Image: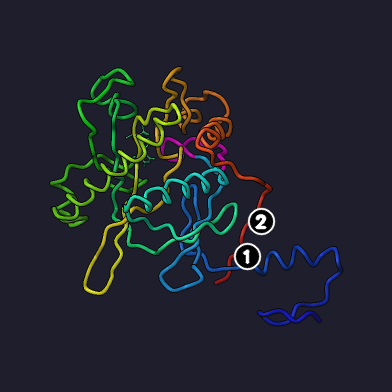
Amino acid sequence: MTRTRRGFLPSLTIKERPRAKRDSMARRKLVYEGKAKILYEGTEPGTLVQYFKDDATAFNAQKKGTINGVLNNRLSEFFMNGLQSIGIPTHFIKRLNMREQLIRQVEIVPLEVIVRNYAAGTMAKRLGMDEGTALPRPIVEFSYKDDSLGDPLVPEEYIIAFGWASQQDLDDIIALALRVNDFMSGIMYGVGIKLVDFKIEIGRVYEGEFMRLIVADEISPDSCRLWDIETGKKLDKDVFREDLGSLSDAYTEVAKRLGVMPSNSAPMPKPTLIN
Ligand code: TYD
């Protein structure tokens, strides 16, 4: 019998042991599973482990394919660390391995906060604008986070009336989103990429009497529109939405330009669920 921290395991052949060890190490409690990520209970109270899957979905999960969860983990770490270094609070604590990061548990504000610098996607469609038209200034808009409704665009009036966020929260969220936009636009501009638009999610954390709003979820080419400044080539999830080639190649290109490349992208085993 082999003694482990969790108890006794039946004796194993040398060949079997590494697999069993990996599985027991990876065993943890599932908190939430979304389209591209899984959340597990973290090691400390108030933390979660965010696992990046390789599943790509678009058009409200009607189109399915593969993305590179390893790259999204690395890129999100890179952006969140950068934001923190200029004083923008985020949920990111540290990257744990190729696919996982430790994050602060937050109460997610049920909004997709979208910042646009150029017309594209639903805005271009809705207003009959040419994709790529420069906007007079960055525009922040909100969608209500509900997949079954297709994340509908909502005015601030709805958000306040339905109690999803207060006017003060919205003012803070807009200020936060514009700072993220300045940071992300600058970083991307430096590597020859235009930040057309992006989406962030905001979480609430409670510290004693105070509530703070921080950047949560992820920031990766999955939630941005990124175009090469010279050629206009798309380097984001639109490559998958519009069948423009390899999504993995596009994300690798972004990671390479930013100097963020995993040294070893061997696949990690999926953690085992315990109840
Ligand atoms: P938008 O043009 O509103 O929608 P779509 O991508 O369906 O055309 O999206 C603006 C940006 O926000 C774009 O970079 C994608 C991102 N986004 C998400 O990542 N998730 C979402 O749920 C939404 C609504 C937008």
Where's residue 132, x and y in %? 33, 21
Residue 242 % position (x, y): 47, 25
Quadrant for ligand 1?
top left
In the image, what residue occupies the spot 50% across and 30% down? 240
Chain part drawn in magenta? 57-68
Residue 106 position, x and y percent, is 35, 62
Which residue is identified by label 2?
A: 269
Look at the picture and state if 21 lies above or below 4.
above
Three-letter amino acid code at the position of disc 1: Ala
Label 2: element kind = loop
221 vs 120: above or below: below
Q: Is residue 172 left or right of residue 150?
A: left
**Amino acid type, callout 2:** Pro
Mark 1 sits near ligand 1, with its Cβ under 8 Å away: no
Quarter of the picture containing the N terminus is bottom right
Residue 132 relative to residue 28: left or right: left
Task: Answer whether residue 1 is magenta in the image.
Answer: no
Instruction: For label 1, count other residues whose C-alpha is less than 10 Å away and answer few (under 14), some (14-19) or many (20+).
Output: some
Compute the Cα span from label 1 to label 2.
8 Å
Q: Residue at x 54, y 41 (%)?
A: 260
Dots 1, 2 in contact, CB < 8 A: yes
Quadrant hosting residue 200: top left
Q: Earlier in the sequence, mark 1 or mark 2?
A: 1
Nearer to us in this view, 148 or 77: 77
Q: Residue at x 58, y 65 (%)?
A: 273
Q: Residues within 10 Å of mark 2 (few under 14, many from 20)?
A: few
The local secondary structure at tag 1 comes to helix
- Residue at x 29% of width, y 55% of height: 109
Q: Which residue is mark 1?
A: 26
